[in-house]
Every structure is written in structure tokens, then in C-alpha cells.
Image (cartoon, rainbow, N blue to C red):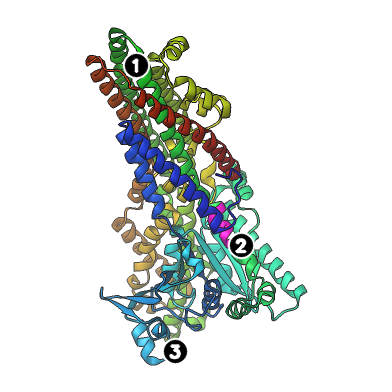
């Protein structure tokens, strides 16, 4: 297992995942052999979860930016129709299969398998017939034999931004769920007004680190112009990103400082997708280099493997360390116990069971503290929640006050136009305000969650100190160990030679591994401020967290969904003066906001989010501690039975345990080095 993090390619990353998984499978077999059923089950769950993992890459951008051509260039052949325009609210997915075909899912729930050559008939507007067909399609999944998708990577072709509001909302809704996004910008007209507003107002700060901006259509400019365009795009995006992060986190906050360091410069790469596709189809290596597409592909692979994939590697490494340490502890406990006199063992057995009960009592008390922390977080958010509707209303009032009107606008034939434009401006402004507030709320939750995970370090220390005390209860002198031909010396010898800590889990932690109960989380202070927050807490801690995107969606859904239809135009038409018109408009808006406030309890939505997040911490601690406690207690109970029957360990059993100990000790030392490299890469 290589300890250098050279995972810039899928093959290197997948090889490392495969090696770690094989090690876990071996540890699972060993755990089953010596009766650690809970440890074995936990290992199996982790292996199964990783086996199902796949990366999702969304291609986003305005219509007519070359998204489909870029996807085809990634696939190496023209799979998607070049003029693809997905049906309303439709996402089209490209996934791996050695047999090419398309599975069409209709809005009425029906499905149909169609020939891949007929894809254009279902997802384009190339003809009246195909356009009508596309309107009935919910999603088309393209199964194709392509090396890019062979490594468990799915490409999601999103609806064109700004082509349809519903399509735009569909694209926004999936961004928090994908592993990486490619935002396609045209070099011929970089930064349309919509793109500028989309980046400034619609993109979440937490999304930015997962996005590569591909400036497409290169090859139509000189090299100097290409470089200048990329540099300009990079500066503008960087400015938008940092200004948004400042607004969410606060310019002087430590979270913003971490964000700047983690995100750095936006990833902006100039490509000529059409030339890349032609080069791949013709096998022209020189043309492919000229397209700059290999640079883009390497950046995407690095993002998926070295940045997103490191979380998977962290999960695997943590599981090896916790499970392997439990194996060695159990082996030492078994041998030492069987060397003891029965009366001595029974005294220590009783004390060990009492220690386990005491640990569980302390854990229950810790859960009360976690609940208190969740309450404190929610109470701390109360000022923001109390002012939510006030801020929304103030935002709307400012829009109304600032809206330019003339006497001509009060004419009957113009009022409906004024009404429509003013309503749209109010809607846009309150959506942007709601999103900013939601991001600020989620940022506060993430910070509190990270702080609580850090605080739980003291409980973790106490927990493993208790586990260590149980282990020490059954320790025997080295003279007795050698006299009985035990495996303890071999275990310690392996560990000392590689880690130098004595081989026990406590020793590994003292060597630098912290936060084992929380999947290593407490080793990353301030980590929640980065773009990995949702993935990290979701994958490693198993926390159910909505994230700002979902909070925003739930808040804005009420605003956008009912805002336009509730105004009474007829009442407004009777007004003849602008000030009276605006005053009446304000009253109507305020009334609408009041109705929306009553019908949708945003405060309760946030409360559920807070407590679900902290419940995740409790669940993780409960699961991980009980694996150790249940298996320890079962081992002690089995030993108690053996002692009562006056049974001893056979030579074959000793040899088996020695082999397990030697393998596991070496694996722990090796995995510790990997764990350290992973931690360093994320700092």
C-alpha cells in the first residue's frame, strides 16, 4: 500500500481503495474467527458502502455553451446529440455499460428501453415530434461503454441554465448532492448577465471548491487572447466567490480564513471541446494536446480522487485502525485471561463488567450534553430566525421604493407590465436574501457541529482510557507470558518496531490519531468551514444534514411559489398616483408575507436541521462505542465460560492468534502512515 497520496488518476485511486478493502475483508474474517461479531458486521457494512460508491459529475451552464460537446469529448465519442435540450425539469445521466442502450423514464411512471441511436428522438427539440416526446420524459439514462464512466463515474447532463426557470431550479437542486461540477462558459461571450448573477447570487459558497470552470470554444483565438480570457474569467470568479463567502462567514472570521486557504483560486481551464472530440475519434494525439482537454481531464480526476476520494480513503483507514486495534486487544485479553488463576480472573471479570457499565452511564450523560449543545445552537440562531421575515420584508420594500416609475406607467395598459416587472424584481431580491440568510444559518450549524465534535474529544479520551483499564486488568507479567509461550510479545514486537507505541489502540492514538469515534472528525478543527463540510459530516459521521441549499429551497419555495399569484391587480389599477400605487403595493406585499409566515414555519425547519445534525454525532458515538463494548463483554463472557470449564488454549489456537496478531500489527502501522498522509493532505 503506497503511503504517498498519488491519486491523480482513477487507476491509482481505485487501486488504493481495492487494497484497503482487501485488508478490511481479511480483518472481517479474523474478527469472525475469534468471535468479534459486532466488529465483523461493522467492517462488512463499511466494505458494502464503499463498494456501492460512485462519483457523480454534473455538467452545467447556459444553453448553447457546448455542454453536450464537452460531455462527448469526455466520453471520447459522440454519444449525446449535439443539440440536446432536455425536457423540462429533466436530468440526463450517462453511466457505464458494456452494452449501449438508453432507458427512458416517463413522467407518468412508465419506462422504455430504446436503441441508443434513437436518443435524439426523445431528448431534443430537433423536430416538432421529438419536442413533443421530450415533454413526456422525466429522465433518460444513457448506458455506454466508455472508459471515463468505467471507474464508477456518472456524468449528469443538466438542463440549460436560463433556458427555463424550472430547469434552472432542477440544476440548482442537485449541486449539493454531486461530487463535482463542470461549469461551461463560452469564450466567445464569457460572463453573460445571467452567468454573473448566477455566480454571485445562486451558487452556494460551499459549492465552489467542487467546480471546474471550463471556458469552451478555444481554438478560435490566438494563444495570447486565450490566456487573457482565462485570466480575466479567473479573476472575476475569484472576486464573486470571496465576496459571497465574506457575506456568509464574515470577513474577519476564522472560518473565512480557512475557506480562503482551502478554496484558493477557482479552477478555470480553457478548452476546445470540439477539437478534443475530433482528436479522440481520429486518434490524433497532437490535436488533443492543442485542445488543452487533457489538462481539464487531469484536473477533474484530481478533484474526484485526491479531493473527494480522500474522504472514502479516510473512512477505510479509520475502520482498519479501529477494527484492527480491537482484534489485537481481544487476542491479548484472551491469552492473558487463560493464563490467570480462576479466582483472579473472576475478580477482574467482575471489575471489567462494572467498568463497562460505568462507560455506558458516562455515555448517557454525554448525550444529555449533546442535546444541550443542540438547544444552545438553536437558541443562538433565534435572533436570525426572529428577524428572517423582517429582513425579507425590508428587502421587498427597498425594491418597491427604488423601482423607477413615471406618470406614463400609471396608464391602464402599462400597469400590468409595471406590476409584472416589479413583482419579478421583488421575487428575485427576496430569493437572494433568503439564500444568504440560509447559508449563514448553515454555516453557524456547521461551526457548532465542529466545535461539539472537538469537545467530545474529552469523552473519547475517557472512553479509550476505560477500555485500556479493562485491558490492563488482565495483564500478566512478561515472565509469565514467555513461560506460557504466548503471543503478546510478538504483538508488542511488531507494533514497537513500526509505530513505537506498544501496539494497543491507545498507543496508536497517542502517536497522532485523534477522533476515532467520529471517523477522525475532531482532527480537522474548523474543517466545517470548507466545501467538504456536507460530504465530510455526511459520509464520515453519518449525519443527516440538509445543507444550505435545502434550507434555502424550503424557505424560497414558499416565497416563489405563492408570491406572484396572491396580489390583487384590480385593486392596484384604481390608484392614479405613483406614491399611492407603491404604498398600496407595499401593503399587499406585507399581507402576503404575513400569510406565508403563518403557513410555513421556517423556525421549525431550522430546529429540525439542528437536532438532526447533533443526533448524527450521538448515533456515531453510540454505534462505535457499542461495537467495542459488546464485543469486549462477549469475549469476557466466553472466557468466563472457558475458565469455569478449566479449558486452555491449544497450540493450534496459539499459532492462529499469533498469525492474526502479526498481520494486524503490521497493517495497523502501515495504515497509521496512510492516515497521517491523508490528514496532512486535508490540512
Residue depth check, mark 1 versus mark 3: number of the one nearer the observer: 1
Residue 189 is tagged as none
Q: Residue at x 43, y 63 (%)?
A: 174
Q: Are marks 1 and 3 in contact (CB under 8 Å)?
A: no
Residue depth check, mark 2 versus mark 1: number of the one nearer the observer: 1
Residue 240: % across, % down: 61, 61
Q: Residue furthest bottom?
A: 128
Q: Secondary structure at mark 2?
A: helix
Magenta stretch: dominant SS? helix
Residue 292: % across, % down: 67, 71
Q: Is residue 56 above or below residue 219?
A: above
Residue 252: % across, % down: 62, 44
Which residue is labeled 1 in the image? 337
Q: Is residue 368 above or below residue 184?
A: above
Viewer-nearest residue: 150 or 576: 150
Q: How many residues crowd mark 1 within 10 Å: few (<14), some (14–19), many (20+)? A: many
Circle nearer the N terminus (2, 1): 2
Residue 538: % across, % down: 42, 48
User: Which quarter of the rendered picture does the N terminus lie within?
Assistant: top right
Q: Is residue 548 above or below residue 119?
A: above
Amino acid at each position: 500500500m503506497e503511503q504517498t497520496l498519488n491519486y491523480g488518476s482513477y487507476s491509482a485511486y481505485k487501486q488504493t481503495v481495492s487494497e484497503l478493502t482487501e485488508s478490511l475483508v481479511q480483518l472481517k474474517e479474523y474478527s469472525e474467527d475469534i468471535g468479534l461479531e459486532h466488529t465483523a458486521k461493522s467492517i462488512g457494512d463499511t466494505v458494502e458502502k464503499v463498494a456501492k460508491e460512485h462519483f457523480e459529475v454534473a455538467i452545467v451552464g447556459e444553453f448553447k455553451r457546448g455542454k453536450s460537446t464537452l460531455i462527448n469529448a469526455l466520453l471520447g465519442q459522440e454519444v449525446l446529440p449535439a443539440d440536446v435540450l432536455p425536457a423540462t425539469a429533466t436530468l440526463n445521466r450517462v453511466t457505464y455499460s458494456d452494452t449501449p442502450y438508453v432507458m427512458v423514464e416517463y413522467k407518468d411512471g412508465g419506462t422504455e428501453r430504446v436503441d441508443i441511436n434513437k436518443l435524439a428522438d426523445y431528448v431534443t427539440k430537433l423536430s416538432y415530434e421529438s419536442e413533443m416526446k421530450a415533454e413526456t420524459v422525466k429522465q433518460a439514462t444513457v448506458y455506454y461503454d466508455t472508459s471515463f464512466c468505467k471507474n464508477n463515474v456518472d456524468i449528469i447532463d443538466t438542463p440549460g441554465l436560463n433556458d427555463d426557470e424550472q430547469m434552472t431550479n432542477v440544476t440548482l437542486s442537485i449541486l449539493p448532492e454531486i461530487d463535482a461540477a463542470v461549469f461551461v462558459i463560452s469564450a466567445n461571450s464569457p460572463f453573460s448577465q445571467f452567468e454573473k448573477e448566477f455566480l454571485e447570487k445562486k451558487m452556494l459558497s460551499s459549492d465552489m471548491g467542487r467546480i471546474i470552470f471550463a471556458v469552451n470554444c478555444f481554438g478560435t483565438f490566438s494563444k495570447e487572447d486565450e490566456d487573457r480570457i482565462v485570466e480575466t474569467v479567473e479573476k472575476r470568479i475569484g472576486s464573486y466567490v470571496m465576496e459571497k463567502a465574506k457575506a456568509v462567514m464574515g470577513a474577519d472570521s476564522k472560518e473565512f480564513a480557512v475557506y480562503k486557504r482551502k478554496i484558493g483560486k477557482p479552477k478555470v481551464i480553457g478548452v476546445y471541446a470540439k477539437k478534443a472530440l475530433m482528436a479522440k475519434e481520429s486518434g490524433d494525439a497532437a490535436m488533443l494536446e492543442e485542445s488543452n482537454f487533457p489538462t481539464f481531464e487531469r484536473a477533474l480526476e484530481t478533484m474526484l480522487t485526491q479531493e473527494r476520494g480522500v474522504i472514502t480513503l479516510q473512512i477505510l483507514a479509520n475502520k482498519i485502525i479501529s477494527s484492527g486495534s480491537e482484534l489485537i486487544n481481544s487476542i491479548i485479553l484472551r491469552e492473558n485471561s487463560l493464563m490467570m488463576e480462576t479466582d483472579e480472573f473472576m475478580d477482574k471479570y467482575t471489575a471489567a463488567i462494572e467498568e463497562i457499565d460505568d462507560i455506558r452511564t458516562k455515555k448517557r450523560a454525554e448525550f444529555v450534553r449533546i442535546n444541550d449543545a443542540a438547544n444552545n445552537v438553536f437558541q443562538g440562531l433565534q435572533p436570525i430566525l426572529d428577524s428572517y421575515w423582517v429582513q425579507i420584508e425590508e428587502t421587498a420594500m427597498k425594491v418597491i421604493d427604488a423601482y423607477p416609475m413615471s406618470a406614463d406607467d400609471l396608464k391602464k395598459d402599462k400597469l400590468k407590465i409595471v406590476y409584472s416587472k416589479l413583482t419579478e424584481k421583488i421575487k428575485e431580491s427576496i430569493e437572494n436574501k433568503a439564500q444568504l440568510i440560509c447559508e449563514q444559518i448553515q454555516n453557524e450549524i456547521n461551526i457548532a457541529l465542529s466545535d461539539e465534535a472537538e469537545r467530545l474529544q474529552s469523552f473519547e479520551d475517557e472512553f479509550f482510557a476505560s477500555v485500556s483499564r479493562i485491558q490492563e486488568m488482565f495483564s500478566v507479567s512478561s515472565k509469565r507470558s514467555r513461560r506460557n509461550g504466548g503471543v503478546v510479545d510478538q504483538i508488542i514486537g511488531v507494533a514497537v518496531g513500526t509505530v513505537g507505541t506498544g501496539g494497543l489502540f491507545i498507543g496508536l492514538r497517542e502517536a497522532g490519531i485523534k477522533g476515532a469515534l467520529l471517523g477522525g472528525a475532531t482532527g480537522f478543527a474548523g474543517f466545517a468551514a470548507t466545501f467538504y463540510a456536507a460530504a465530510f459530516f455526511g459520509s464520515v459521521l453519518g449525519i443527516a444534514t440538509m445543507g444550505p441549499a435545502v434550507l434555502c429551497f424550503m424557505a424560497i419555495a414558499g416565497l416563489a411559489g405563492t408570491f406572484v399569484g396572491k396580489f390583487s391587480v384590480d385593486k392596484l389599477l384604481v390608484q392614479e398616483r405613483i406614491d399611492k400605487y407603491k404604498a398600496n403595493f407595499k401593503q399587499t406585499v406585507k399581507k402576503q408575507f404575513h400569510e406565508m409566515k403563518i403557513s410555513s414555519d421556517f423556525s421549525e425547519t431550522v430546529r429540525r436541521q439542528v437536532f438532526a445534525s447533533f443526533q448524527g454525532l450521538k448515533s456515531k458515538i453510540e454505534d462505535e462505542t457499542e461495537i467495542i463494548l459488546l464485543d469486549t463483554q462477549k469475549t469476557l463472557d466466553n472466557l468466563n465460560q472457558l475458565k469455569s470449564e478449566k479449558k486452555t488454549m491449544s497450540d493450534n489456537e496459539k499459532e492462529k492468534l499469533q498469525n492474526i496478531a502479526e498481520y494486524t500489527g503490521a497493517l495497523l502501522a502501515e495504515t497509521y502512515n496512510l492516515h497521517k498522509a491523508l490528514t496532512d493532505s486535508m490540512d
